[in-house]
Amino acid sequence: MTQNLSVGDSALATALSQFDRAVHMLGINGGTAAMLRTCKRELTVNFPVRMDDGSVKVFTGYRIHHSTVRGPCKGGIRYSPHVTLDEVRALAMWMTWKCAVVNIPYGGAKGGVLVDTKKHSLRELEGITRRYATEISLFIDPSGDIPAPDMGTNAQTMAWIMDTYSMHRGYSVPAIVTGKPINIGGSAGRHEATGRGVMFTVREAYKTLNWDFSKARVAVQGFGNVGSISAQTAYEMGCSVVGVSDIEGGLYNSDGIDIPELIAYRRQHGSFKGYSKGKFITNDELLSCDCDVLVPAAMENQLTQHTAGSVKARMVAEGANGPTTPEGDEILNAKGVIVLPDILCNAGGVVTSYFEWVQDLQQLFWEEDDITKRLERIMIRSFHDVYDKSKALNTDLRTGAQCLGIGRVAESHITRGLYP
């Protein structure tokens, strides 16, 4: 399907702009570029679910495969009332490059359901998930497409998908999803992997640039799985976490925030409001706060032509997918800000998902310490692969990462040839 865009700030517009820049630098021929630019398969499903009050509501969901050339498709499932087909296409494309950058044998996929999880009971969410899983069973398979959690979904969601798929086959298939609970085949360290990977990358970047990591002041936008673990890991590494935020706003304290204490407070009270050891700030203020490392770990399109200019950080570590628009990139690059791109920086989740999948297939499980060490090695190696590529091409780290990932996928296409 040809992907025509009209909204300049859409996630797909950003993904394709990044892609076109990298392809131009790599000199990839038109036919190969056209294949890489287009998603391989797209499935849209509309399905009914009975609500608690007896009424029936119809939901829309998507599952998209971007590429299968390097291996099975891998990518999360997002539950949000704002999910769009173009957004899912962009996320699937980014997953392909991300898997190639960290050199694991996957292609990119993504899924989404248009649903506001806050408006539904746990039973309704289970019904939505099981019906959606049944509808996309045309696409998912342990050898072909392995979903995982994303925004709005979690380990319980993956358990429902795993159980639904298994019921249809008559035996347990734990390798159908990753990010599931440990007691049904999940992996130790999976929950923490993305946030830990962000900080492993930041620390290695500091070391490579000869900056003093022990003096790094970190601010994290978003306090979900990725943001909270990034903040916690930064705190454990000895950094001063000066700012955090969630959808309702956040906190800033130039002297640093006690992250374990804040996590406990938020768990008890449901938000940061009322926490006395910091100044309450908005999300926009968090992006422009006085810090050394800014970790946007919420949603895409946060650092734009309107907000990037106010960034005071010397480094941006993208915990979220697509948080910086091309216009925002230009502004940050002009300011000399080092941007650790999403397809490198937040790849810890898919790396550990790969570990989980391998463990499920082998029915042999590893200790968390072993998983964390394996993750750290891969993130460090991948940072240097990207850093070296950017130096060789005399470009920024994002373009270096895009060129590295896209180049690896293009080489695989050329090696496999064109069928028939």
Image (cartoon, rainbow, N blue to C red):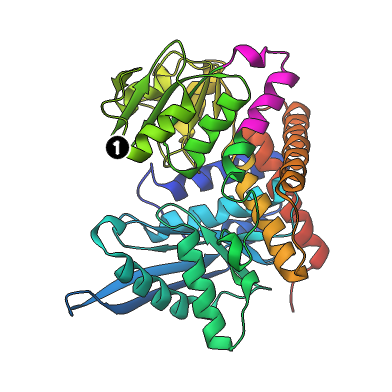
**Span of residues in magenta:** 199-216
Counting labels gives 1
Residue 296, percent across and down?
47, 33
Residue 25 in the image: above or below residue 31: above
Judging by the rendered image, the residue that carries numbered circle 1 is 269
Residue 278 in the image: above or below residue 126: above
Residue 385, percent across and down?
77, 36
| Residue 70 makes an appearance in the image | no
Task: Judge from the rendering whether residue 407 lies leftward or rightward of residue 226; answer left or right.
Answer: right
Q: Quadrant of residue 33?
A: bottom right
Q: Is residue 371 magenta?
A: no
Q: Quadrant of residue 213?
A: top right
Q: Residue at x 74, y 60 (%)?
A: 365
Q: Residue at x 56, y 49 (%)?
A: 191
| Residue 378 makes an appearance in the image | yes
The secondary structure that dominates the magenta segment is helix
Q: Residue at x 61, y 19 (%)?
A: 238
Residue 419, percent across and down?
74, 76
For the residue pair 167 and 20, the one nearer the viewer reads as: 167
| Label 1: few (<14), some (14–19) or many (≥20) C-alpha neighbours in 10 Å | few
Task: Judge from the rendering whether residue 65 lies leftward or rightward of residue 153; answer left or right.
Answer: right
Task: Judge from the rendering whether residue 30 lies leftward or rightward of residue 54; answer left or right.
Answer: right
Task: Judge from the rendering whether residue 56 lies leftward or rightward of residue 292; answer left or right.
Answer: left
For the residue pair 124 and 152, the one nearer the viewer reads as: 124
Residue 163 in the image: above or below residue 72: below
Q: Is residue 201 magenta?
A: yes
Q: Quadrant of the C terminus?
A: bottom right
Element at badge 1? helix
